[in-house]
C-alpha cells in the first residue's frame, strides 16, 4: 500500500498494484481509507494498549491475574525494565517503516538510517542489560550487530 517502486525516470508505482501511480489521488485515498486505519489499530493501538496495561500494573506484575495474560511479555526481564519487549516491538516497527517509507530514496539513506537506529538501541541495550540472563543480553546485542552488518 505504501511502498513505491520506480518504473520510469520520473514515475513511481505502488509495489502492490503497478497500475496505481504513487501519490495520485487514488493512491492517497486508498492509503487513508485502508492503510492508515490498519496502522493505527495494529501497529500503534495494540502495542499502546499493552503498554498502558503493563505500566498501569507495573507494581503488581507478580499477581496471578496479570501473569495470566502478560507474563510472556516480561518473563526473563529484570524488574525495572519489564517493558523491554515493547522496545523490541518498536524497533521492528521502525525497521519496517524505514524499509517501506524510504523505498523511493537512495538505498544508502535507508541503510544509514537503519544502522543509526540499531546503534542507538545497542547503546541502550548495553546500558540497561534488560535480561536476567547475561547470555540473552549478549545474544540481543549480537543480533542487532548482525542486522547492522547485513544492511550493507
Image: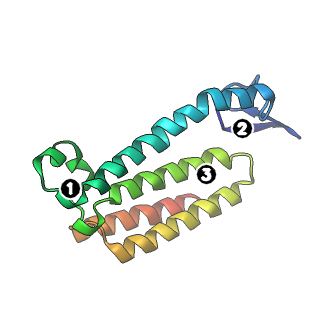
Residue found at the very far top of the displayed protein: 19
| Label pair 2/1, CB-CB below 8 angstroms | no
Q: Measure the alpha-carbon separation of dots 2 and 1.
A: 39 Å
35 in relation to 123, above or below: above
Element under disc 3: helix
Q: In the image, what residue occupies the spot 39% across and 67% down? A: 141
- Tag on residue 53? none
Q: In the image, what residue occupies the spot 61% across and 51% down? A: 98
Q: Which residue lies under the disc numbered 3?
A: 98
Element under disc 1: loop
133 in relation to 26, above or below: below
Residue found at the very far right of the displayed protein: 9
Q: Which residue lies under the disc numbered 1?
A: 75
Q: In the image, what residue occupies the spot 22% across and 66% down? A: 79
Mark closest to the chain's N terminus, 2 or 3: 2
Q: Which residue lies under the disc numbered 2?
A: 4
Q: In the image, what residue occupies the spot 50% across and 49% down? A: 93
**Residue 124 % position (x, y):** 42, 72
Residue found at the very far left of the displayed protein: 64
Q: Is residue 18 left or right of residue 77?
A: right
Image-quadrant location for residue 4: top right
Label 2 neighbourhood size at 10 Å, few (<14), some (14-19), many (20+)?
Answer: many
Front of the two marks 2 and 1: 1
Q: Is residue 86 left or right of residue 65?
A: right
**Residue 121 % position (x, y):** 46, 67
Element under disc 2: strand
Amino acid at each position: 500500500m505504501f511502498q513505491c517502486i520506480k518504473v520510469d525516470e520520473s514515475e513511481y508505482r505502488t509495489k502492490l498494484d503497478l497500475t496505481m501511480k504513487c501519490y495520485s489521488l487514488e493512491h492517497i485515498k486508498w492509503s487513508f481509507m485502508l492503510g492508515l486505519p490498519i496502522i493505527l489499530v495494529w501497529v500503534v493501538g495494540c502495542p499502546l494498549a499493552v503498554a498502558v496495561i503493563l505500566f498501569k500494573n507495573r507494581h503488581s506484575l507478580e499477581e496471578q491475574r496479570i501473569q495470566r495474560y502478560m507474563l510472556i511479555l516480561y518473563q526473563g526481564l529484570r524488574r525495572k525494565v519489564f517493558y523491554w519487549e515493547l522496545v523490541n516491538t518498536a524497533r521492528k516497527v521502525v525497521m519496517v517503516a524505514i524499509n517501506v517509507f524510504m523505498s523511493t530514496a537512495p538505498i544508502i539513506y535507508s541503510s544509514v538510517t537503519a544502522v543509526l537506529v540499531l546503534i542507538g538501541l545497542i547503546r541502550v541495550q548495553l546500558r540497561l542489560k534488560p535480561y536476567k540472563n547475561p547470555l540473552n543480553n549478549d545474544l540481543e546485542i549480537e543480533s542487532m550487530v548482525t542486522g547492522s552488518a547485513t544492511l550493507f
